[in-house]
Amino acid sequence: MVFARLVAGRFHYGWIVVGVVFVALLAAAGIRATPGVLIVPLQDAFGWSRATISLAIAINLLLYGLMGPFAAALMQSIGVRRTVVGGLVLLAASVAASTAMTASWQLILTWGVLVGFGSGMIALVMGATVANRWFTTHRGLVMGIFSASSATGQLVFLPMLGWVVDHGGWRAVAWIVGAAAAAIVPLVWLLLPEQPRDVGAAAYGAKVDQPPTAPPASNPIGVAFGALGVGAQSRDFWLLFASFFVCGASTNGLIGTHLISYCLDQGIPEVHAASLLALMGMFDLAGTTLSGWLTDRYDSRVLLFWYYGLRGLSLLYLPFSGFNAVTLSIFAMFYGLDWLATVPPTVRLATDAFGKQTAPVIFGWIFVGHQLGAASIALVAGAMRAALGSYGPPVMISGMLCIVAAIAVLWIGRGTRAARGPESVALGA
């Protein structure tokens, strides 16, 4: 690659890869989270209930997670670059098509099914794959940066999109995010090699004579289900899966989807409510990157204990916060620091348990748990709000689940050995 030759000798090309992946994750996550801004505008425009719109969001979240292991396996088979470009093209096309929708099933098809598939091809499993391929040292830090970009994309763009909704309508939002996805395609195609050896380098921190990564399997479905078979034999896999279920329930599913509507119920304007998510995004960028740095140095189980425990306490506090500018700003800053701080230690524990080659696909299945949690609480919170007239109960439930998860993660890696990955098991043919 021409650009790689230009930077050779100045710094490691892996950091360019980090920048490209950061932008792709940022955009994909922002598009996936856009329906959170559209709940009330779509309700006003079409008369659809919040429960119906929440169903589309729940499908979006679920497919975003379910694509994870298959996307990771596809990256091993046809390459990261082709997988990511395919996801971006699907996102751009499906979001553009949504501007012509007139029925709720079209909402479910475009913003639910197709956006779920497209964003799932450009999710954190891509970050885990790239981090393991391009970095031997600082892998936790890199995964922290990728995790931060994913959450920041969901949160920082929402105030701008909220302003667009107020001044140009929901269709203007769809055209903007669709164009953003299309604009990133050439960046990925030109600047994202598959392996360090493609630019004449070794992984960052690796010895030059380190053997190359094993050739990819040809059957991505076999690779994905083979990894699930390995993981299902391990108690650690199920503990990571369950804790990530709670992570998804308490972030994307609850706060990312329903905080704006929750604030509107309290008389807070939509743009002001969206600015709280932006504040979370800015603090997440620092908090999750710091979590990656800490993951390189401290016990990941202890980090997860504190992350889940403090998140649970903050959620239990939210219904009693008074919803004024000061208390909500404090909540947003604190919650932002902890938003996706769980990802780097979770990836580290998966890599330690299953090996560098298999870990991205295993993490894809763990990420399914994350999105099952997100989809469940997105749907349940919408239904409970419709039935009870309040978001208080689902917020309290999520807070209590976080406390349970904080205790459960301390048992990861204790008492039994996880099934090993590529050292002992072939994951596909």
Image (cartoon, rainbow, N blue to C red):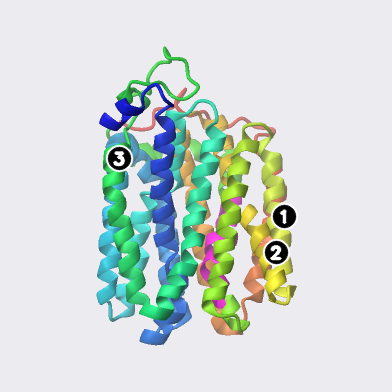
Viewer-side residue, 148 vs 258: 148
Tag 1 residue? 310
Q: Residues within 10 Å of mark 1 (few under 14, many from 20)?
A: some
Q: Where is residue 261, by image quadrant?
A: bottom right
Q: Position of residue 9 (x, y in %)?
A: 39, 21
The type of residue carrying mark 1 is Leu
Viewer-side residue, 48 vs 245: 48
Position of residue 71 in the picture relative to residue 276 (left or right): left
Q: CA distance from mark 3 to mark 2?
A: 40 Å
Position of residue 136 in the picture relative to residue 115 (left or right): right
Mark before the other along the chain sequence, 2 or 1? 1
Tag 2 residue? 330
Tag 3 residue? 81
Position of residue 211 in the picture relative to residue 285 (left or right): left
Residue 111 belongs to magenta span: no
The type of residue carrying mark 2 is Ile
**Secondary structure category for the residue under label 1:** helix
Position of residue 267 in the picture relative to residue 95 (left or right): right
Q: Position of residue 249 (x, y in %)?
A: 57, 60
- Find the magenta span and give its range: 242-261
